[in-house]
Image (spheres, rainbow, N blue to C red):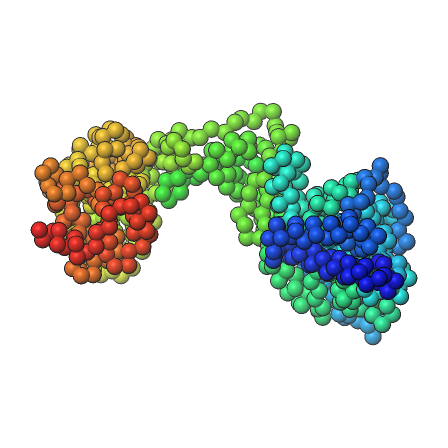
Amino acid sequence: MNAIKSLNQEQQDIVAKMRTLITEVRKHNNAYYVMDEPTISDNEYDQLRLSLIELEERYPDLTQSDSPTASVGDNPLPSFSQVQHDIPMLSLGNVFNKEELAEFMRRVNDRLSSNNKNPAYEMELKLDGLAVSLKYQNGRFVRGVTRGDGQTGEDITQNVKTINNIPLVLEAAFDIEVLEVRGEVLMPKAGFERLNRKAKQVDGKIFANPRNAAAGSLRQLDPAVAANRPLAFYAYSVNQGLPEHIVNQSEALGWLKEIGFTVSAVKVVNDLEEAQAYYESVIEERSGLPFEIDGTVIKVDNLQLQSELGYLSREPRWATAYKFPAETVMTKLNAIEWQVGRTGQITPVGKLEPVQVGGVTVSNVTLHNIGEIQRLDVRAGDTVSVHRAGDVIPKVTRVWHELRPEDSQPVTLPTHCPVCDSPVVLPEGEALARCTGELFCPAQQQEALIHFVSRKAMDIDGLGERWLISFFEQGIVKTVADIYHLEQHREALINFEKLGEKSVNNLLAAIDNSKKTTLSRFIYAIGIKGVGETTAQNLAQHFGDLPALMDASIESLETVPDIGTITAEQIYDFFRAKHNVEVIEALIEAGVHWEKVEQVEAEGLPLDGETWVITGTLVESGMSRDDAKSKLQALGAKVSGSVSAKTSALLAGEKAGSKLTKAQQLGVRVVEETEFLQMIQD
Ligand code: IVH
């Protein structure tokens, strides 16, 4: 740095301006790259940096050696020169669980004299980057070297200068002749993502992970390229030049922070339990950290004790890495099985040779859908990489095609349900295949039963979910039709959970009552995918009776209000699955019946041709939405469940929400309750 004293007033002012800009740029570099919390816009940042560059170009003599733009003048290197480390850069041993950590602490204790037993430990994050040694002479940065083989590394001085949070001049260490600081160079997650995003736009190199990106950036021969890589340095030790009054590792890190370095979290612990608690707290915080870590490091805090303990071959006896369980492991995919979900979706599940991933044993992994299988190009017998981080669901991240057995076969979607043998369909444009045996498929029956008895469906009061599931598990009720044969199990029911005769009589009476229903309730109750209450009413109104609905083509289904192609196909498929038809026949045979629907002849009615939607609560009249709907239908309107450009009007009661907003956006007429009441009166 130029000595300010020998400069004239004008020069002093320019230097002061440069220093202000340097401080600002550094501050924002740190906020952006290290903390991932930029406080100014990219544009403002560029402006600041540009102002500094302009000053430096105008006054090259006054340019400050620690300027964050400093690298720009350096030329690409032909290669890196090799540098011998004064003190070898060693590595750490590993422990993976509490028992192994206890064993490490026991070994430390065994070696310490009796008055030094049970020392305090200092714990840090194990940063997932590259070890680098930085050397300062009288407070000025002179050389940066990679770890290399531990004895000799590569001189990366000019790249180190481009790392924004590395101080090039230490305000407080001018009196230390040689200071060596070691730490980790890493690429924060946000910077890594930004870099890859930019690279994608220009077809540049995509890095597999932040560590690779950091390594690639540090080994850039062209410092101008390195300067644009978002790297950060976290100091973790002082290997030469530590002031004598500092006696602990924790204090050393505090001092590093004071003189301008970034250090990661530090925690002093006194025993195994505290160490374990810290390790567990770090696991919790891990995903929220701005950079990647692969564990914690535990070090005997007292530096004197550290030197007493010394080294065993290439590892210190006073420290070890307490690593996180591996998050990505390779294993064999033994088979791919198709599972049927409660609502009929068919998903492929990979059966793995069990492995430990992220600390738990994993033997199943979802492969999501046939599209994902094709994308991964995965087959039974393949070797795969499985990743599981935190409580995230395990995932196949890679298929080792080079290790594929010769006789492996491509995976195809099953044509029939593995549970009930009904046809499987994969609707166009959808990812998930589904079983069409909604009423019959045992995998879907529990859901089907619960839906069938619900209030808006067959409304069988007294047949609660708990009993229903219990009956199902005992095999008394399998399909919804079996509900109407429960009287055959009268005796068993009376004894069942001490229900008693009275309750059973009530229950059987409720079941009997439910036999008399309406067509729309029945259509809703049989649980066709995509057919809610409104659609069921529209279908009943449109077709008038069940046989017409069962025979309807996709085209004619599409003419019913509210029904698009997907729902039309789902209804069509439902009635093509022979098992569903059998259950429907059994229901009718058991006595379920309804009156033929009087199809409203809409022609000539005031709201003929209009489609209405109802939302909110009708406070003034106290009318339920169902009542309002019947009134509208009686006036010839169709009533739909959702607002679209085709909607003629929205009847909006109190507390109308998103439907009202949507109607307003689409310019759909909004009718308030008063107006509606007036309308029906007229
Ligand atoms: S102390 C004698 N502290 O882990 C070695 N290392 O396997 C003392 N590392 O090469 C190293 N975070 O690159 C230390 N907080 C931390 C660390 C850390 C990451 C890396 C370092 C070293 C490797 C050892």
**Measured from the top left, where is residue 552 in percent x and y?**
22, 30
The image shows residue 668, relative to residue 301, as above or below, that is above
**Measured from the top left, where is residue 557 in percent x and y?**
24, 33
Whether residue 667 is visible, yes or no, is: yes
The image shows residue 563, relative to residue 455, as above or below, that is above
In the image shown, does 424 or 392 lie closer to the viewer? 392
The residue at the point 84 percent across, 62 percent down is 8
In the image shown, does 63 or 357 lie closer to the viewer? 63
The residue at the point 44 percent across, 38 percent down is 347
The residue at the point 23 percent across, 43 percent down is 648
Judge left or right: residue 534 versus residue 108.
left
In the image shown, does 205 or 18 lie closer to the viewer? 18
**Measured from the top left, where is residue 284 in percent x and y?**
59, 59
Locate the N terminus by quadrant: bottom right
Whether residue 482 is visible, yes or no, is: no
Judge left or right: residue 627 versus residue 133.
left
